[in-house]
Amino acid sequence: MAAVGQAININSNRRAYDPETHSVLANSPVRGSREWWIEVENKLASERESRAGSEEILLRLVDEDDPDIPDKLRRAVQSALQGIQHGYSPELCKEGVGGTYFLFDHRGKKTGVFKPQDEEPFHVNNPKGFRPRHETDAGIKHGILVGEASVRECVAYLLDHNGFAGVPATVLCLCEHEAFTYNERFTPRPSRMIQPALSTKLKLGSFQKYVKHDGDSEDIVPSLLSRFPVHEVQKIALLDIRLVNTDRHGGNILWREESSSTISLVPIDHGFTLPANLSEAFFAWLIWPQAMLPFDASCRAYIQSLDVESDIQLLQEKFGRTIDGRHFRILRVTTLLLKLAAPAGLSPGQVGEMMSRDNLEEPCLLEQLCTTAELTCGHSSDDRVFLGALQPLLQREISRILTRDHN
């Protein structure tokens, strides 16, 4: 397991090619390995032949036998498939820097959002002009490789236990349609280990159930912001802190009016969460008044219930090598931070400030504390030892922040 000092290094997202690991885990779908695509294409060969001469159309779950996929998500995927079969093509969203497509049901109403892995920024089929960069694995955010955003979308949903933060239901799917983007074939370098399908137009990506909404919080007027309930803001802040969201801007916080007096918020776009380092956390809600209040009772109870080791086991089972020891250590650090800060009375805003850099050149407070903890424990690769060194540092800093802000 990498030490946190390495994880904090902004160049730590460059991952060396490991032939042994690549071979052993070749059946993992989340990185689009060559071996996995061969297996998929062989499996679907007979179906493709049965519809020879017709338009290539396909939408299905990557793991149709996964018992953890809720019925509502299965129905949404089936609804989108029916829409494609009725002639409603995927529609590319004009916003964003990656390939994001709206999918429709048989009546032409939006039912899902599909984000192909190979259309992410700097991947081979990106439709927005962000083509693969030369001699680098680095993605648009430090600590998240090209091609990993689709998996992060699913991670956020899985770790949003009981739908506490309201992350829309999300799952990995295979989809094929002429409306998607297909650039000239690009052969990835060995270190990239991310490949599109070999000989078809099949795409691997995240499918998210579409959520009806009245707008997003980008450039909202103060009168609307003041109507956002404290809990609705804090539930998203809790999620973002825990997953170290590096891209929480107003455009990916949706709002909808449940009644004349009630507004709910829905967080979307979690492709840039759970990075391998702490260098780029970004929270638009950091200056919102609701985030300046201590965590409410329901947030504190939720934080108390978190079991980070169970979460890590879940990620290992679902996503194999895409989520590794560096990300697990980050998740352990943020969970520990929340479990110490929330009952002590810190607000989401105060915790978020600990994780935010004042400028890109200087580490944030949490990075500094992690570095000190590393030195204290002799750069131990054992997370239990490292967290044992980090905990008193966090407790001392939390007390200092409470005293400072109280005075």
Image: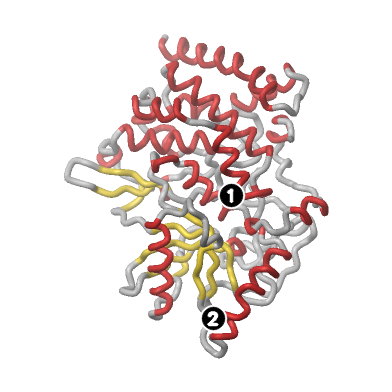
Image: 241 above or below 270: above
Image point (58%, 33%), residue name? 309
Q: Amino acid at mark 2?
A: Glu
Residue 150, given in percent of the width and then of the height, sits at 56, 55
Q: In the rendered image, which residue does mark 1 sit on? A: 318
Q: In which image quadrant can residue 276 be found?
A: top right
Q: Earlier in the sequence, mark 1 or mark 2?
A: 2
Q: Amino acid at mark 1?
A: Lys
Q: Residue furthest left?
A: 260
Residue 162, given in percent of the width and then of the height, sits at 40, 41
- Secondary structure of the residue carrying tag 2 is loop
Q: In which image quadrant can residue 366 be found?
A: top right
Q: Residue furthest bottom?
A: 53
Out of 317 and 184, give the one closest to the viewer. 317
Q: In the rendered image, which residue does mark 2 sit on? A: 56
Image: 369 above or below 207: above
Q: Is the Cβ of the residue at disc 1 closer than 8 Å to that at disc 2?
A: no
